[in-house]
Image: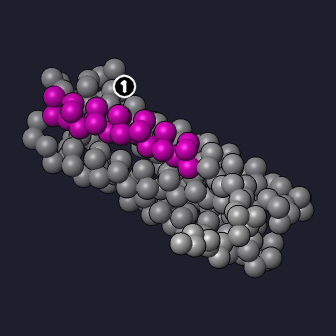
Amino acid sequence: MNYATTENPADWKLPSARKLGILTLILAESALFTIFVVAYLFYTGKSLNGPYPNEVLEFPLLGTIALFSSSGTIFMAERCLHAGNKPGFSLWWGITAALGIYFLYFTGSEWYHLILEKNLTIATNTFGTTFYSLVGLHAFHVIVGVLLLLGILISALRGRLHPDHTEHVQAISYYWHFVDCIWIVVLTVVYILSVRVPQ
């Protein structure tokens, strides 16, 4: 029996270390977020004193629109890069970074309102502790993503982004899409489910 195949072993390549690394990071970070989400759900409705989610939380519409839109803009940036359209890449990549910065501004404004006007701090009650831990963890990942986006944008504007940097761009894109996907979970758990739990 002939077990020979038409595939040439010489054509086989090891998976990209950069892509494998970012995917491994995403898996690890997903496990971390899972722990925080489970903790938030476990303690939902168990605060002995207010304020409670339904009293202070408002749906973060503008921030959510900005973050979800950034997945589309980073996709457009990648398409421009593959097409060799460097100005288009810089434009869409810059818009992505701007949307990420706006999301962080929105989150900061929300926290300012909650802390100074609603008296909800991380030490106020169980809700405050779990809220700032989970939302803060996500915000930290957005900060990291924005810094990565800005680093690539600066390189592109200085003419130092070359075709061999495609994997760098793809890795950051994977990370950014991951941040967006995590926001879907955080949004659902914190701003939709927990506000409906009777206190």
Amino acid on which the number 1 mark rests in the picture: Ile
Extreme residue toward the right, this view: 159
Q: Nearer the viewer, residue 130 or 104?
A: 130
Which residue was labeled with disc 1?
A: 122
Q: Position of residue 53 (x, y in %)?
A: 23, 40
Residue at coordinates 28% horizontally, 36% vertically from top-left?
38
Q: Nearer the viewer, residue 128 or 152?
A: 152
Q: Quadrant of residue 118?
A: top left
Q: Is residue 68 visible?
A: yes
- Residue 90 counted in the magenta span: no
Q: Position of residue 166 (x, y in %)?
A: 75, 62
Mark 1 closeness class: few <14, some 14–19, many ≥20 residues within 10 Å: some
Classify residue 54 as left or right of residue 97.
left
Q: Is residue 104 visible?
A: no
Residue at coordinates 28% horizontally, 47% vertically from top-left?
189
Classify residue 45 as left or right of residue 67.
left
> Secondary structure under badge 1?
loop
Q: Position of residue 186 (x, y in %)?
A: 36, 47
Q: Quadrant of residue 127?
A: top left
What's the magenta bit mostly, secondary-structure-wise?
A: helix
- Residue 42 counted in the magenta span: yes
Residue at coordinates 51% horizontally, 66% vertically from top-left?
69
For residue 60, above or below residue 32: below
Q: Which residues are magenta?
A: 23-46
Q: Quadrant of residue 119?
A: top left
Q: Nearer the viewer, residue 185 or 102?
A: 185
Q: Quadrant of the C terminus?
A: top left
